[in-house]
Amino acid sequence: MPNPKRRHSQQRSAKRRTHYKATSATLTTDSVTGEIHVRHRAYVSEGKLYYNGKVVAEKSPVKK
């Protein structure tokens, strides 16, 4: 495998890493439930799973 002949300087590595930024998740408020959730993700509200303002799944009672 090819290996570098010389060591990369710290400045060169830092220049490459300047583009890696931490971004905060985009939050939105649902118009149906009023819950704040991460966009494009399903979320649970009062035992029901919502996505795009619609109920996707409901929690069924546990049978013993």
Image: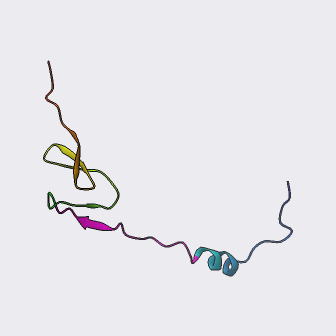
> In the rendering, at what x and y percent does residue 6 appear?
83, 71
Count of all numbered marks drawn on residues in the image: 0
Quadrant the C terminus occupies? top left
Q: Main secondary structure of the magenta part?
A: loop
- Which residue is at 15% across, 58% downward? 32
Q: Relative to 43, is 58 above or below? A: above
Colouring scheme applied when the structure was drawn: rainbow
> In the rendering, at what x and y percent does residue 53 appear?
22, 55
Judge from the rendering whether residue 3 lies leftward or rightward of residue 15; answer left or right: right
| Of the pair 19 and 6, the residue shown nearer to us | 19
- Extreme residue in the top direction: 64
> In the rendering, at what x and y percent does residue 59 appear?
18, 36
| Of the pair 32 and 46, the residue shown nearer to us | 32
- Which residue is at 49% across, 73% downward? 21
- Which residue is at 64% across, 75% downward? 16
- Residue 3: say if magenta: no
> In the rendering, at what x and y percent does residue 30 appear?
20, 62
- Which residue is at 68% across, 77% downward? 10
**Which residue range is magenta in the image?**
18-31
Q: Relative to 15, is 55 above or below? A: above
